[in-house]
Each structure stands twice: as C-alpha cells, then as structure tokens.
Amino acid sequence: MLFLWTKAFHILFVMSWFAGLFYLPRIFVNLAMETETVATERLLLMARKLYRFMSLLALPAMVLGLALMWMLYGGGEGRVKIPGWMHAKLTFVVLLLGYHHACGSILRKFEKGVNQRSHTWFRWFNEVPVVMLLAVVVLVVVKPF
C-alpha cells in the first residue's frame, strides 16, 4: 500500500512540476515580445514566483521517484536488475532537470535585461518538455526494452 501512495504522490508532483515547465517558457515568449516596462516587471514577477514554486515541486517529485526506485529495485534482499527502459527514463529526467535549470538561467538574463533570444526561439524552446514528457510516458507505459 505504501508503494501505491508513493506512486500516486510522485505522479501528482511530477504533473505539477510539468505545469511549471510548460508555462514558464510561455512567460518567456511574452517577455521577449514585451516593450512596456510595467508589463515586463509584472511578467518577471510572475516568472520568478513560478520558477520558485516549480523548483519546490520538483524536489518531492525526485525524492518520491527515488523512493519508488528503491522499493522496486533496491529494497529487498534479492536485488533486481534495473531494466533498460528505466535507464532511458532516468536519462530524460536528468535532461528535464537541465531544462529546468536552463529556465532559471534564462530568467536571470531577462532580469538583467540581457536576453538576446526572440519570441520565436522561446516558442520552440517551449516544446522541449512536451517531447520529453511524451518519451517518458511511452517508456514507463510501454516498457519497450
């Protein structure tokens, strides 16, 4: 039963974290297009609050994910070999953490007023977590290898 509760909360925290990963780059699109100082300051405030909140959500998502890994593959006497699909999933998780930190770096550039990227670039950047989420879901559900 503990496994199922852990899994449920892991999924909820991952979903919440992804909401931030999807929305923050949309704020970047608007920041890249904005010319009015008041609107820019409001968007920066939104972006800072969202980045802080999604960072807090990522932490329990990761901790619960590690707990699930321990329950499945490392918690018993007869240790089970971790399957290939899990290695691939974990690779995407590491890439998503890198994306998350890249968002923080981009936010700092907007705060300093040194962003050089266009709104079109940020529209494409916004699609990265969608592709990675698709890959993770397929790996977890289909378990292709």
Image: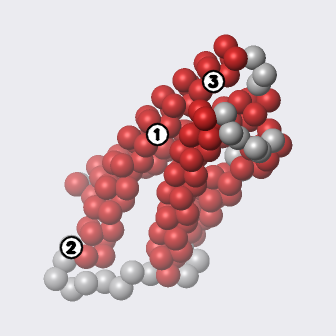
**Where does label 2 land, which residue?**
75
Q: Residue at x 80, y 38 (%)?
A: 119
Between the residue at mark 1 and the residue at mark 2, the CA separation in whole angstroms equals: 29 Å
Q: Residue at x 48, y 43 (%)?
A: 17
91 relative position to 119: left or right: left
Q: Is residue 8 visible?
A: no
Q: What residue occupies the far left of the structure in this picture?
A: 77
- Answer left or right for 101 relative to 29: left
User: To which residue does mark 1 refer?
Assistant: 54
Classify 10 Å Cα crowding around label 1: few (below 14), some (14-19), many (20 and above). Answer: many
Place of residue 23 in the rendered image (x, y in percent of width and height, measured from the top left): 62, 36
Badge nearest the viewer, 3 or 1: 3
Q: Residues within 10 Å of mark 3 (few under 14, many from 20)?
A: some
Nearest to N terminus: mark 3 or mark 1: 3
Q: Nearer the viewer, mark 2 or mark 3?
A: 3
Q: Is residue 57 above or below residue 27?
A: below
- Separation of disc 2 and disc 3 at Cα? 45 Å
What amino acid type is highlighted by mark number 3? Leu
Where does residue 20 sit, x and y in percent of width and height? 54, 39
Find numbered disc 2 in the image and state the secondary structure of the residue it sits on: loop
Task: Residue under label 3, please give it.
Answer: 43
Q: Earlier in the sequence, mark 1 or mark 2?
A: 1
Among numbered discs 2 and 3, the one appearing first in the sequence: 3
Q: Is residue 106 above or below residue 82?
A: above
The x, y position of residue 48, in whole percent, is 51, 31
Q: Is residue 103 visible?
A: yes
Q: Which amino acid lies under the numbered mark 1 shown in the image of this protein? A: Met
Residue 80 position (above or below residue 63):
below
